[in-house]
Amino acid sequence: MTTYTKADRAPLTERQEARRRRILRATTQLAARGGYESVQMREVAELSEVALGTLYRYFPSKVHLLVATMYDQLDQLHGQLRRRPPKSAGARERVVDTLLRAFKGMQREPHLTEAMMRALQFADRSVGAEVDTVSRETTSMILEAISGDEPPNEPTTEELAVIRVITHTWHSSLIAWLNGRASIAQVRTDIETVCRLIPED
């Protein structure tokens, strides 16, 4: 079965992983304070206590850094969902619950959410690997919500297409909420509507 949960990056030593964690924590802290514009590479380096050149070896740009931060946030959420999975009986309801729980977490840190979503929008081909990890993590969360207590099966092409549409809608709803063009209730309605694409159990 295809693995959708882990980022595709070379294994790091314990020391390198600790440095990477410090960088991501510093990025999260700066973004939570003031959004995308508050994340400056020099400040990230200073706050994480790494040399600026070292930071650029890990993350070639601010966009790379913030997309990696989004993966990290989703990975933490995924762990929480595995510890406390949605209890709804139907697959549609479980996916709605999963995405609304993610949205609720993002509501608590609107500046951080804005920074990560802007980075996704700005990402070009050079950030493709990082964007793919975010996509796979989201896909994995949705697949696990669909399957419920059972291990997820290898998704079909049609199922992956449905998940892409659901993900696109979720992202668009987040952006509309961040821009003040959608209320929390509208975001919920959009998510509930698009999840009707999931076949009934």
Image (spheres, helix red, strand yellow):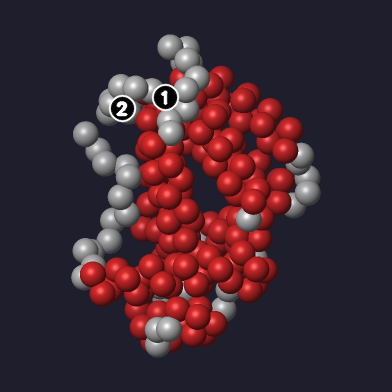
Front residue of 32 and 114: 32
Residue 131 coordinates in the image, percent (x, y): 43, 55
Determine whether 171 is above or below 55 in the image.
above
Rendered residue at 47%/61% (across/down): 69
Asked whether residue 41 is in view, the answer is: no
Please name the amino acid that badge 2 sits on: Pro
Do the CB atoms of the residues marked 2 and 1 lie less than 8 Å apart? yes
Res 159 quadrant in image: top left
**Pointer 1 residue:** 146
Determine whether 173 is above or below 22 in the image.
above
**Pointer 2 residue:** 152
Extreme-top residue of the structure: 201
At mark 1, the secondary structure is helix
Residue 94 coordinates in the image, percent (x, y): 49, 25
Disc 2 residue crowd, few under 14, some 14–19, many 20+, Cα 10 Å: some
At mark 2, the secondary structure is loop
Res 18 quadrant in image: bottom left
